[in-house]
């Protein structure tokens, strides 16, 4: 995306063709910091501590992690064995996003096909780059397909403002370009549709308030930050026309794991007869699981992410403790929205309903 | 309630019998500050800026505000006219809680019946004190009736931990003693029921994390602070046995205005077949409105309450800005949960379902 006049992605390869550069998203919107990744430990740290986050970006970061493992294992007596071990560690960095294992395994397959240490490094680098480009293109196509849905609402409203609600950040920061949930928004906005985005702040880590608001603001898209509690009230009063969110893992039966709180918004949309769309590249589908609520592993994170909130005070990024020091907290990162609450999926191949036959109809090769 | 060995209420009359003392709840849990109210402007400021909050406490503060108006108008050429004017200003301080107008009007009636400036002051003081005692007693009775519901769950679970979820603070800080939603929790806990409370942090002002967690901690009640996003996930996984919340205004048909986000929890409880109770003294019923979603006025507050979050940093209470400085926000204080999602009301006279006939059956004099 073009930010302040510069072309930027959340992850790229340095000119040295070895160092992986990522935006440290923990610092946004108040500081723009780029981190270098040159070891697998750094890759794992960046994924776990959420320098990078969002299913597609985690997948690409994992893919580049295999290149880093290959590079650092180039003098090992058994480079392939070393890479395999490192890949297991990378895949365990976060449990919910299916793209992580998908990206790592896809690069690993290319590594296995190569026949020398240098060839393995090159193969990993090339495949990681291919995945990044594919994800960017997938997001572009999601934008094209999803913009049609927004335009249809705009026509129905005779061109008056279309209000889209989104939760968390499924923007270009979570992907490579365009975003998943935001791709239709950017595309419709670029086509001149009058729209406005309700941005759920998305506790505990406030990716909506910090990242989605920053992205939309930089692109000039009208938006308003609201608490995660507000969406139901807005829907009751006809102030939301559609909901579009991303996902970290969606079963091939249509159950959607996404940032904690998504399920509550889906319930409210259902109760108020408002379309609830999930935008995703096919890499986010889990083709093995059938019951999302029962089967998708939900990450429990450090409760201090709930207790402490980060923001700007007197020009400095500061963390404040909200509850009493002695009160325990719990931090669940995701929840699962059952397929029955989902109006449709916006994928790189088009839109389908949240049902196994329609999903497989769109991706018959699976 | 007894806090750190001392009997304390959120509002009381000073020994001078004129100054009204309130806990400045904006400062909790990190600072315990008491504010003096001796003018109507101070009363309005304390209500609007939420030194005091919670429907019953707002009602009692408004009631004492009439006494302050009577005192300050004692030398006015038309004391009664002055008091009436001041009462209109007090009633306009916040729009949603019905208790405010109810408390003010009830004291005003006594003022009208008195025949001298001094008698009017005494009548207002006496009636405000009666309202405070009645609300305390109502909350005690809500505790007794509601504890039976918790005990029934405990028996069904063979004594294993009963998990109660609550939203915002409907504790003694919001009332006079015991609280509304917390009264059954305190009562059941005191009777020895094994229970645990999921405390919604309750954005934007974090009354759950700041006030409910503080209250429960001081009383020794096991609790865990969670984001407002987490409740649906917990309910899907059988980790919530019942929900109990308070209310700022409930129509006599059973629609419940409460802190923004309550509606989302009610939807999740409904979707997972979990009982959703609302605890309230009868002073919170609005006997004139029939459609809560359409009729109850929902207060819009300063968006900076969403953008800035207050907590402790380096031993100091500090506010941090979360979204980009340039991103607008919106702040809706309440939402309305339709009666169809409410399992029952816990009142001072017992428990009833959320239906006009049952509510009127319990309060036939209305």
Image: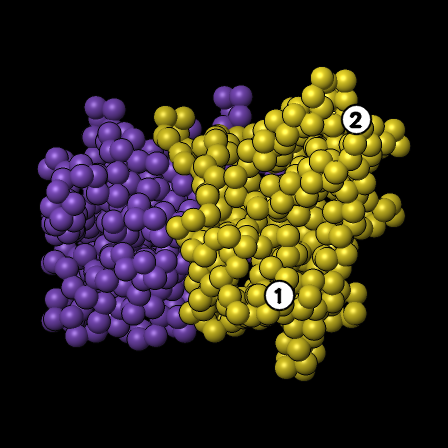
Chain colours: A yellow, B purple
Residue A96 visible to an observer of this rendering: yes
Q: Could you say which disc has been placed on residue A117 in the image?
A: 2
Few, some or many C-alpha atoms within 10 Å of disc 1 (few <14, some 14-19, many ≥20)?
A: few
Q: Position of residue A48 (x, y in %)?
A: 58, 32
- Tell me which chain the residue with mark 1 is part of: A
Q: Position of residue B65 (x, y in %)?
A: 32, 50
Q: Nearer the viewer, residue A356 or A42?
A: A356
Name the chain letter of the residue that bears numbered label 2: A
Q: Are marks 2 and 1 in contact (CB under 8 Å)?
A: no
Residue at 52% over, 43% down: A96
Quarter of the picture containing the C terminus of chain B is bottom left
Helix, strand or loop under label 2: helix
Left or right placement of residue A8 versus residue B217 in this view: right
Residue A224 falls left or right of residue A131: left
Residue sitting at x 21%, y 35%: B1
Count numbered badges in the picture.
2
**Element type at marker 1?**
loop
Q: Nearer the viewer, residue A341 or B146?
A: A341
């Amino acid at each position: 995306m073009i930010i302040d006049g510069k072309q930027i992605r959340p992850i790229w390869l340095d000119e040295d063709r070895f160092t992986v550069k990522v935006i440290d998203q923990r610092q946004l919107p108040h500081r723009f910091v780029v981190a270098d990744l040159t070891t697998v430990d750094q890759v794992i740290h960046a994924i776990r501590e959420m320098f990078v986050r969002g299913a597609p970006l985690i997948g690409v970061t994992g893919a580049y992690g295999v290149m880093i493992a290959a590079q650092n294992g180039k003098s090992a007596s058994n480079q392939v064995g070393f890479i395999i071990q490192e890949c297991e560690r990378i895949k365990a960095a976060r449990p919910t996003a299916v793209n992580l294992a998908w990206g790592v395994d896809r690069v690993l397959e290319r590594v296995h096909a190569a026949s020398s240490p240098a060839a393995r490094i090159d193969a990993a680098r090339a495949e990681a780059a291919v995945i990044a480009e594919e994800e960017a293109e997938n997001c572009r196509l999601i934008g094209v397909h999803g913009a049609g849905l927004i335009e249809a609402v705009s026509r129905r409203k005779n061109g008056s403002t279309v209000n889209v609600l989104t939760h968390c950040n499924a923007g270009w920061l979570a992907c490579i370009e365009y975003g998943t949930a935001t791709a239709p928004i950017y595309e419709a906005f670029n086509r001149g549709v009058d729209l406005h985005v309700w941005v759920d702040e998305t506790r505990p880590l406030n990716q909506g308030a910090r990242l989605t608001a920053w992205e939309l603001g930089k692109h000039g898209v009208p938006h308003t930050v609201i608490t995660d509690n507000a969406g139901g009230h807005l829907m009751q009063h006809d102030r939301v026309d559609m909901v579009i969110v991303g996902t970290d893992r969606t079963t091939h039966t249509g159950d959607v794991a996404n940032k904690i709180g998504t399920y509550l918004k889906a319930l409210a949309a259902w109760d108020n007869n408002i379309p609830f769309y999930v935008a995703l590249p096919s890499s986010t589908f889990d083709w093995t699981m059938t019951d999302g609520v029962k089967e998708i592993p939900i990450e429990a994170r450090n409760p201090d992410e709930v207790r402490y909130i980060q923001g700007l005070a007197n020009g400095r990024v500061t963390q404040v403790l909200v509850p009493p020091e002695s009160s325990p907290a719990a931090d669940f990162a995701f929840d699962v929205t059952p397929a029955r609450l989902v109006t449709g999926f916006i994928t790189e191949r088009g839109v389908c309903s949240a049902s196994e036959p329609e999903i497989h109809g769109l991706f018959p090769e699976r």
